[in-house]
Image: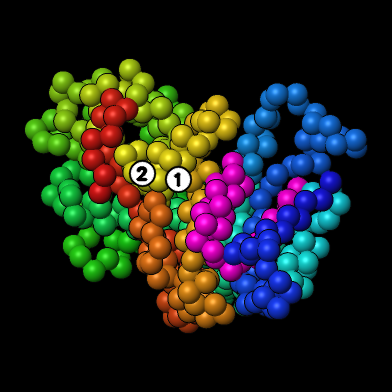
Amino acid sequence: MLLVLGLTLGADAQVDSTMRLNDSLRRKIAIFAPLYLDSAFDATGAYRYDKNFPKFINPGLEFYEGARMALDTLQKEHAMLDVRLYDTRAAGMSLQQQLDSASALGVDLIIGQVNSATELQQIATAAMRKNIPFINANYPNDAGITNNPSLVILNSTLRAHCEAIYRYLQRNYPTRPLVFFRKKGSQEERLKGYFTELDKKTMGVPLKIKYVTLEDNFDAPALAASMDSLTQTVCIAGSLDDDFATKLCALLATLNRSYHTTIIGMPTWDNLDLARPEFAGEEIAYSTPFYLNQADTLVKLITNNFKTRFYSRPSDMVFRGYESTYHFAKLLLLHGSNLNGSIGEKKFKVFNDLEIMPVFLNRQTMTLDYFENKKLYFIRKLDGAVVGVN
């Protein structure tokens, strides 16, 4: 089953043919998301899963729901848009064929929920060839892409997170003992490499970080050996491994009576249950480009809408679908074909402050490789409850 859903906004069903000439002024957007409709429906069109929604379908479906709600809002604002939705998991048309279709339509903007590096590379390459801005709404990786000014990464890369963590430590803990706990592994080496690289190029005073490689069976005394009982020790978790993170936090919590610690986690910690009883008393901070203020009027409106229609709470994909669609559609309507040069404007904030900045991976050639959201929030939690946002 192939889904190419065309949504024409800002049109009145009663307008005459002369007014429809204005359709040529509509800006065109292509949204790519993995909806898995061919897996969800059989040859007769019957839904395969009764009343259930398999987990592999949910992210794409919820991203689409968020985008659809944004389009409803834009419809009410009489936005002149032609929006096409492509199911990247459609059996009847390959992703490349879908990209060719969007290109033939003359789309002005591509928004994508991406599942893999290969998919990101394919869409980014197609966007660059036609000079079409491509908003990668969710995939936190550049997939090795360089020299592609059409690519915009909203979910900041690991390198960007490390840069933000480094600055956060410089601002808040410049004189505290800093211990970088890690395990053995290539990913952990990469993380350490980002921090040591920042030591060399920082404009401020370099941090004095102690790097400690822990054995797989590390215990509380192994941690205490690198900490100072007379002052606050800032413990940086230098791994993306959830099991390592869980063990590190639990053991540091057992040392609370003798050691005052603050834990700086990785961006993946947004998915950890930080309210676990074994973490009691530990203040944990981590970085994220997406922070939802639950008191925000629009957040509450979308949450209630989702509960009413689907009897469940919306995941972050719903809000990312809404934000990426509304924010960049409004910029497109304002700037038209000049959007590439105005992609970083901060107008039309939805939930987050976006700081879309150019990335130059090679400082010698100064070639613009892509754009990236550099705005990162630091969420501080104690016993699972948010105690601060920086």
Query: Where residue 249 sits in the image (x, y, percent)?
Result: 33, 28
Tally of numbered tags: 2
Q: Looking at the picture, which amino acid does disc 1 mark? A: Glu
Residue 313 part of the magenta-drawn span: no
Task: State the CA–CA distance, disc 1 to disc 2.
Answer: 40 Å
When the figure is inspected, residue 218 is found, relative to residue 365, above or below; the finding is above
Q: To which residue does mark 1 refer?
A: 188
- The span picked out in magenta is 62-89
Q: For residue 325, which numbered disc appears in the image?
A: none
Picture colour scheme:
rainbow
- Give residue 201's quadrant in the image: bottom left
Residue at x 50%, y 61% (from the top left corner): 77
* Residue 244 image point, x, y percent: 43, 31
Residue extending farthest top:
277
Instruction: Please give the label number shown on residue 297.
Output: 2
Give the residue at x 24% y 32%.
Answer: 283
Relative depth, front residue between 248 and 8: 8
The answer to which of marks 1 and 2 sits earlier in the sequence is 1
Q: Amino acid at mark 2?
A: Thr
Give me the residue at 76% from left, 48% from top.
89
Say what secondary structure mark 1 lies in: helix
Q: Name the foreground residue: 9 vs 147.
A: 9
- Mark 1 or 2: the one toward you: 2
Q: Residue at x 32, y 61 (%)?
A: 198
Q: Which residue is more in the foreground, 30 or 287?
A: 30
Q: Position of residue 36 (x, y in %)?
A: 74, 42
Res 107 seen here:
no
**From this viewpoint, which residue is outermost toward the right?**
43
Instruction: Categorize mark 2 by other alpha carbons within 10 Å: few (<14), some (14-19), many (20+).
Output: few
